[in-house]
Image (spheres, rainbow, N blue to C red):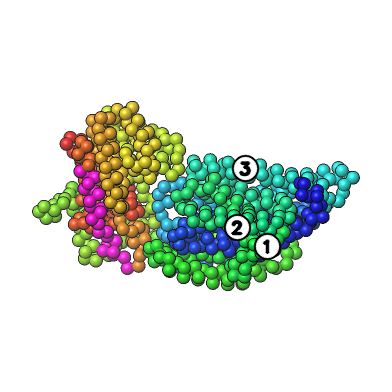
Amino acid sequence: MILERERPAARPDARATSLGHRDDIQGLRAVAVLLVALGHAGIRFLRGGFVGVDVFFVLSGFLITGLLIAGAEKRGFVSLREFYARRAKRILPAAALTLIVTDIAAYRLLNFVRAKQPIQDSIWAAFFSANVQFARQGVDYFARSQPPSPIQHYWSLAVEEQFYLVWPVLLSVVLVGIAVRRRRRPSDRSPGAPAERAFSERRLALVIIVASLGSLAWSIYYTHRTPAAAYFATLARAWELGLGAALAIGASRFAHLSDRARAVMGWAGVAAIGLAAVLFADTTPFPGSWALLPTVGTALVIAAGIGNERSPRGVGAQLARAPLRYVGDRSYAFYLWHWPVLLIAASYAGHTLSLGPNLLLLGGAFVLSIASYALVENPIRRAPLRRPVRASAVLWGTTVALVVLVAVLDLRSIDQKVLLKHATPVGAIPTLAPPVEASPGAPRALPAVIAAVQAARQGSPIPGSLEPSIDRLLSDRYHPPSPDCVADHDEPKIKQVCPLLEAGSSRTLVVFGDSHAAEWMPAILWAASQDGWKVIPLIELGCIPSRYANVCAPFVEWAEREVASLHPDAVLVGARLTVGTPKQRADSVSGLGALATAMRPLAPDVVLIGDPPAQAGQPTDCLLTRGATLQTCISTLTDDQLSVYRDAAGAVTAAGAAFIDTMGWFCFENQCPMIVGHAIAYRDNQHISTTYALELRQLFRDAFTQALTA
């Protein structure tokens, strides 16, 4: 405030300068979108390129708030009709065009399971609620193992639009209060009076600072508690837009900085953004407190350019160069196009693409950006705005209707494909015959598995009727009676003990493990119901029950205490075997051995289920690939997979526990088919399907009973 009192005439100039077109901000837009796009393309040293979205949030809060304040100073009130109409012109046409083209491309180029995801997501995106959809998927452990949606980047647009549903209205309410106060003070009627403007700045600043601090506090807490959901949550992100808004409100405070101060602030801000992009990764708890680094850095760069973005020693002169300005002008379009181009190409190819092809794809996405900017985004944005309410209604109604219409037509066509492909149901789920020796000395394998491998070697086609049908495969997994019965390592919550099959049971069985224990629950519960077992699952998805899994130590310690207090008759352990580096394999084996040793004094019987070997690819993609056969959808065991399996069996039996050998239930002569008979054995590359687990239920019951008597 001292600055304004000493130089009252400078304030209007500072305000005008800060809110006018700034080439350095266009350059900063380019930096932000390039960080995001190049990070998505796979440049290793930009693993944290996702912070470019946070740069956009701060920029958006600064620019939009500045425009709102400028309009209010000109008219004496905030024109919500004009704001939302201009927002619709700026955002909707390009966003809707990208959604429609993405839906059509997904429908034409991807298999119907993979195409269905972005088409459904596009409806959420059309209503600017994509972040809600992706937050819901983010807290699903099994959904996180699937490829991301080509529409996923629309979550950031949803966050912005949800923020701007509230902030302009709140700003208007604050300014109305100021206007009322001015009417009650006839001694000072000038809208531009320094005292009144200073009061409005203080009041607006107080509102946005309090709201932003609350949002930041929630972001830190929510990121720690539920990181996958927090990443997409508007309340956890609102403070980033609020930071930009606060900077716009107090813009005049930075108008008279020295060139040296501007240089220090600007380069420090760029360094902060760069450090975040280089040092952060997918494992960084984000947003939370870590998001302060790129957002404060962005605020410093913006503040350094207020009043004079072309300081010769400042970063503004570099950001204002023509190539960066050119990219910055098209940054919104490029952001919209780059992600579906990369994702659809990778899904079409059936594997993750390397850096070279991804960079070529980014070049193609930028060409699309140039075209859509020139033909759609810019002409509509610059069109005269005569009737704001009508223009806004027409734009919102038309774009939403077009996106939904294309999506519904595509989904109906996909449903027809599903009906044609799976017209004949398989019927009741059978049980499989016991294992046999295919040849003297060979490992025992199920006759159905032997037949599946032999059919694959002959190049037999994929059976016409599969169970489950491929469109239901990803959902063919164990669903606990309550979500609280199974915890998720990435989404920590209060763990609950949920006894199952208590009625009439005489013995207690604890099932201890991760998702590789949960996949056996259908067979376990069937066997337990036949033999009078009460089942108590102690399961945390993503947490290997190993004494050496440090990140899962709290879960393992909690489960061990529960086992000690429950005094079960048996403990059944299911765990993923880590096939990675030699050290990771050794730790996986020794960790399970140590766990079996720790469990032996706590229960009369401890049994480990042999972990079925992982498939090389995703069954959904392989089975729907053009020209797919049983031969193309079979995996060959690697030496590492075999060694870690055998070593785990040895470590567990050496500790005095029993081991259920499941290898012959899935593989024969080192080959593991995705389809056994008419059953799809794997729901994804890591987990078996509930359908196949139920086919194995009698075999599992016999093997478990034998392990208890061994």
Residue neighbourhood size for the residue with mark 2, other residues' Cα within 10 Å, grouped as few (<14), some (14–19), many (≥20): some
Return the residue found at the far front.
Answer: 260
Q: Which residue is mark 3?
A: 213
- The magenta stretch spans which residues? 627-650
Crowd around label 3: few <14 · some 14–19 · many ≥20 (10 Å) = some
The residue that disc 1 covers is 311
Q: Amino acid type of disc 2?
A: Trp
Q: CA distance from mark 2 to mark 1?
A: 12 Å
- In the rendered view, does 452 fall on the left or right side of 358? left
Residue 162: image x %, image y %? Answer: 61, 51
Q: Can you tell which mark lies on residue 267?
A: 2
In the rendered image, residue 268, in percent from the top left (x then y), is placed at 59, 55
Left or right? Give the position of 274 relative to 20.
Answer: left
Element marked by disc 1? loop
In the image, what residue occupies the spot 21% across and 65% down? 458
Outermost residue toward the right in this view:
187
